[in-house]
Amino acid sequence: MNIIIAGDGEAGFYLAEALVDSNHDITVVDPHDELLKMIEAHTDLMTIVGDSNSVSVLKRANVNKADLVISVLHDEAINILTAILAKKLGAKRAIARVATLENVSVENRKIYEELGIDYLISPEDIAGHEVVKLLDQPEATEIFDFSDGKLSVFLFKIEQQAPVIGKSLKVIAKEYGFLKFRAVAIHRGNDTFLPQADTVFEAGDLVYVITKREAKEQLLKLAGKKKIEVNNIMIVGGGRVGKVIARRVENDLNVKLIEIDRERSMQLTDLLDNTLIINGDSRDITLLEDEGIDKVDAFIAVTNNSETNILTCLHAKKFGIKKSIALVENLDYIEISQNIGIDTVINKKLIVASHIIKHSMGDEVTSLKCLSGINSDIIELIAMEGSPVTKKPLRDLKMPSGALIGGIIRNEESFIAVGDLQIEPGDEVVVFSLPGVKHKIEKMFLKSSLAF
């Protein structure tokens, strides 16, 4: 696939790197000459210096031969114009990143589709919705659902008192019988690996688990997690992400929102009906104490400054906050943030990559999630008629090294992947993927005349 990525910094670069492993021909268009020199020094990507909303620049990038054009600059007006021009100049599909929430409304999406834009993505909107989901299941570090929650993937940190510590998967299976969930990946120290039958859990392990809806309580117990009730939340940052969160939960929870900018605070007062807006600096410990931080169940820091978000979350943890969530833009800070005690890290670059990489893959890929801090993915694919994965039971399938099938959704039923289960055409299959194997996994789900 010929892909053009229009960016203005790290977001475009990260997306290009994420797509390199999928054997695409990628051209990066960016106005920053120095950044493109760095990209050329580390990758085989084609680069063009210039503004993506320029017809001449798009023509130099051979936009008429592009299968996909992705515009992810910080300026949504440039993204929208880039996508429209790209389609008019012959690109098959175009995606634009937007920031104004009204642009992703159903009505406005239709207008942009008529102008030629195939897909609009608002990372701020998606980040806000991810936080809301975590407030509903605060014991988890990350959550993502497949097929409307028929299967879910949870990330848990194994606590010191967890009953699985020192036990292998084989031993756990003997003790508890058939489980309606399965560990698909473990992150320990600096390593991420696929668990085997003799893999032993350790305290502090970050474990990705695929589970059926009804098994979540048992999963919590085995991870050593206590049930968390969230009634009072404090949000730091009244930008787009903070606004989305407050709007979604203010009628169900007690919400306080701290915003340092006075003018924005006044605007938020008009927009939010049941949220207490506080104009102040969240780094001021006295302010946090005066606003009753010791009574808050979840603390959410989503300002435009990663350092402020990390620092305020750490302050909040000292007051006994049960759940801390930080928006962290610097990818290098994600693992550090997790290691120093922040419960959940949200990153907009990973959000953009998760939603866009799917569009660079075939129709059999229905969803994809780039995981925080471990450079791996969880993919949901449809098994095509005659594809290799439908030929044999799971235990006999030769899956690519670094890939693990976690679960299967068949019509209205969901199944945890076990050895004697066989995938049928039309099944939706959830697969964990280590770096560099996405395209190999994709081939397994396509129609093939090869024998497996």
Image: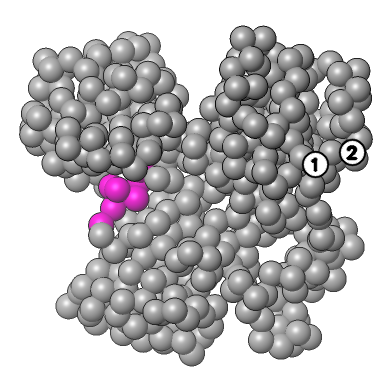
Q: Position of residue 358 (x, y in %)?
A: 34, 50
Amino acid of disc 1? Asn
Q: Which mark is residue 232?
A: 1
Residue at 46% across, 75% down: 408
Q: Position of residue 296 (x, y in %)?
A: 84, 38
Question: Position of 88 compared to 293: left or right?
Answer: left
Q: Report how far apart the C-alphas of labels 1 and 2 lie in the structure.
A: 7 Å
The residue tagged 2 is 295
Q: Position of residue 182 (x, y in %)?
A: 61, 72
Q: Position of residue 382 (x, y in %)?
A: 33, 69
What is the number of callouts on the image?
2
Residue at 65% across, 32% down: 273
The question of residue 357 being in magenta is answered with yes
Q: Is residue 236 above or below residue 204?
A: above
**Residue 335 picture quarter:** top right
Q: Nearer the viewer, residue 224 or 266?
A: 266
**Residue 165 picture quarter:** bottom right
**Residue 394 picture quarter:** bottom left
Q: Which mark is residue 9?
A: none
Q: Residues within 10 Å of mark 1 (few under 14, many from 20)?
A: some
* Magenta region: 356-362
- Helix, strand or loop status at disc 2: helix
Amino acid of disc 2? Lys
Task: Work out whether residue 178 can be spotted.
Answer: yes
